[in-house]
Every structure is written in structure tokens, then in C-alpha cells.
Amino acid sequence: MTKIFKMDCDNIDENDLKCCGAILKNGGTVAFPTETVYGLGANALDPEAIKGIFTAKGRPSDNPLIVHVTKVEDIVPLVEEIPKAALRAMEAFWPGPLTILFKKSPLIPQEVTAGLLTVGIRLPSHPIARGVIEAAGIPIAAPSANISGKPSPTIAAHVVEDLMGKVDAIIDGGDCEVGLESTVLDLTGEAPMILRPGGITKEMLEEVLGTKVLEDPALDKISMEGATPKSPGMKYTHYSPRAEVLVIIGERTAVVNKINEMKQKYIKEGKKVGIICRDETYSLYADAVAKSMGLGSNLSMMAANLFRILREFDSTDVDVILAEGVEEAEVGRAIMNRLIKASGYQVIHV
Ligand code: TXA
Ligand code: MG
């Protein structure tokens, strides 16, 4: 049975926290909000507890988990070494939406890293996430709290939909602010490399690290092109709603025209069309279910709404979703990465 805890960020009930901490300590699974997306936590040092995560999510066992801590010194026993660049990145961006890869120590079980020699570690800023991890008193492995293949949950209702009856507890702590998963940064190679774009952008990292930051060249490539992403999770076509998704990229008016043209074609074929757009273009789409990510000038707002919109389309009967691309500046890079993955790499340039 899954126990549901309702928590208020500004007034967290200490007893409920203790209860969730105890579940984790005893090898159970607890879903909790973080500033990025909801996570499904378990004791990172206990292989049996880790299996509980993989089973509940239906996650492929070759996809490693991120370990969450609340104090920088907590990472010392978990890693072989802390490079200087990592110290700088941690100081600038922790607590927050940045996961850093380190060479793992023997304390981290194989099950967490899917056999890799590196471990991803993150120090979240969300008060409930921090409270639960502290109450457990152990490092907590936590992937996004969705069934494998579905968009990451940004509200508790998404977690309930996916994991009710499959985990020990779910904490309902409101909406996640960032709405996209953390940036994954690999500092174990010759040059810093982003394996998954997120809220902490390449530009922000370059400024703090004082050096060029690369991006995994395989990120947005079709797997058929023979490129394998370094982050195992990035090779799956997930984030996918039930409907087919196509992303249309280009100058704004041309994109709107193209989407309306494609929409007519699909309607003629008897298909129902959904559209993902911005506030500015929302009124330009008739005869379709249009959902706006927010103001085009506010990339953070669009990021925060994307996964919720993808999930909302699952409860409609649309067959095809036509999505406006966004500019790849700042967090727009992460939005496009998730949109392109949701589309199974079906991108149209106009
Ligand atoms: O924002 C987040 O990171 C959320 C919250 C809950 O913290 N967690 C999250 O976890 O998104 P998950 O498991 O859904 O995504 C983790 C990603 C996967 O793509 C995985 O392959 C990659 O990070 N990853 C984890 N450890 C890795 C490693 N040692 N080497 C390469 N990639 C790794
Ligand atoms: Mg995930």
C-alpha cells in the first residue's frame, strides 16, 4: 500500500518527515518533490532497496541512478576524488539543478551505477527533498518518479498516476519549479561535458569553470546514426505522450503557417490534432487543441510547463501533436532536447 503525505514547503511536518526517513532507512521507496521534477528515492547504499526503484518504474537495469545528498562533505565517502572543477561547480550551483559525475568509491553499489565506474551526485535545494534525505540520514538514489518512458512528473498527481500501489510513500509537496531534470555534467574526462542539458546551462558552466564546456555530440542524434549518448538514459525515446509528436523549427511566422498547413492535412485524414505553442501564437490555431507553454520571452516558464502539457495530452484523444520549437538559448536548449526526444527525432525545419 502506498501512503500519501501532504506537505507544505513553508511548514513541513517533522513527524511526517521522520516517518518518510524511516521508510527509506528500512529499505523502502518514497517519492518526493525536488526543484527539478519529483524523484523516487531509496537507500543508495542498499542494493535491495535500489531494486525496488527499478521494479516500480519498470526501468531498464542499464540506466544508472543519481545519488542525492544534502551536504557537500557527504560526497567524500562516495567518490574516489573531487576534481578542482567540481569544487567550483559545486560552490556555484549547489544546492540546485546540477548533477556532477565523479569516479565512484566502492561504497556505491553496482546496481546504482548500472556497472559504470562513475556516479552522478546532486545536492537539491527543495526543502522537502532536503528534509527527507536528512531524516533518512543516508545518501538517497532517486530517478524521476515516473514509469519508465513517460514524461517526468512535475506535480504529485503525475506520480500518483504512475506509481500508486508500487511504492511505499508519495509526498505531495506541490509543483516543481524548474520542471525539467537536472543538467548532468561529466568532469571525469579531459574536458567538461554536458551529458543532459538542464536548468544550469552551458553558458553558466563555462563562466564558472573558465573553460569551454562540450556537449555530448550524440545528444540529439537519431540512434540509427550510430551515435550512442554517454548518459545511458538519453538513448531511450522517452518523455513520450501517446500521440505522435512532431517539432517544427524556424522563423515564427513560417512555423505557425507550417503547423496550420500540416494541421489541415491531418484533419482531412480524420485525425485529431494537438498543438504546443506560446502565449503569443496561441490564438492563431483554430480547429485544434492548443496548449501554451507560456510567454515566448520566458524560457524558464516554458520549461516548467512542458512535461505537464505532454501528460495532459495523454488524457485527450489527439492523434498528432505539432510542437513549436523554441530558441536554443539558455534553458531553451534543454526544452528542445526534451521536445526532440518526445518526438522520436521527428523534426521539421521551415
Ligand atoms: O533532476 C534530476 O536529476 C531528477 C531529480 C529527481 O533529482 N532525477 C533524474 O533522474 O532525472 P533520472 O534517473 O530520471 O535521470 C538520470 C540521468 C539518466 O539519463 C542517466 O542515464 C544519467 O542521468 N546518469 C546517471 N548516472 C550516470 C553516470 N554515472 N554516467 C552517465 N549518466 C548517468
Ligand atoms: Mg527520468
Image (spheres, grey):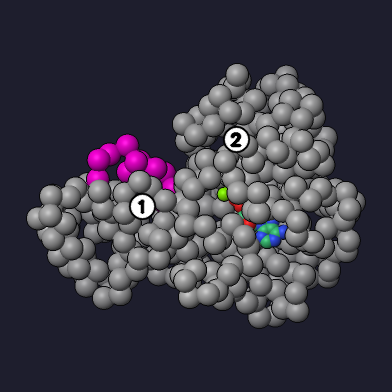
Q: Residue at x 66, y 72 (%)?
A: 193
Q: Is residue 315 magenta?
A: yes
Check whether the beta carbons of the residues at disc 1 and disc 2 lie within 8 A of each other.
no
Front residue of 278/61: it is: 61
Q: Residues within 10 Å of mark 2 (few under 14, many from 20)?
A: many
Mark linked to residue 274: none
**Quadrant housing the C terminus:** bottom left
In what element is the residue under mark 1?
loop
Quadrant position of the N terminus in the picture? top right
Q: Magenta part mainly helix, strand or loop?
A: helix
Residue type of the residue flagged with mark 2: Ala
Badge 2 marks a residue whose secondary structure is helix
Query: How far from the left and from the top, in percent, is residue 187?
Result: 74, 69
Residue 332 in the image: state x and y as whole percent: 46, 65
> Which residue corresponds to mark 2?
56
Q: Quadrant of residue 315?
A: top left
Cβ(mark 2) to ligand 1 < 8 Å?
no
- What residue does disc 1 label? 293
Front residue of this view, candidates 166 and 144: 166
322 versus 15 height, above or below: below
- In the displayed structure, 245 sits above or below 194; it is above
- Which range of residues does the magenta coloring cover? 304-318
Please state which amino acid type lies under the numbered disc 1: Met
* Mark closer to the chain start, 1 or 2: 2
For label 1, the crowd category at 10 Å Cα-Cα, with few meaning under 14, some 14 to 19 and many 20 or more, is: many
Is residue 10 in view from this perspective?
A: no
The residue lying at 56 percent from left, 24 percent from top is 165
Q: Residue at x 79, y 26 (%)?
A: 26
> What percent of the width, then of the height, locates residue 55?
62, 37
Write the residue at 62% across / 28% down. 167
Find the distance from the CA under tag 1 to the CA under tag 2.
30 Å
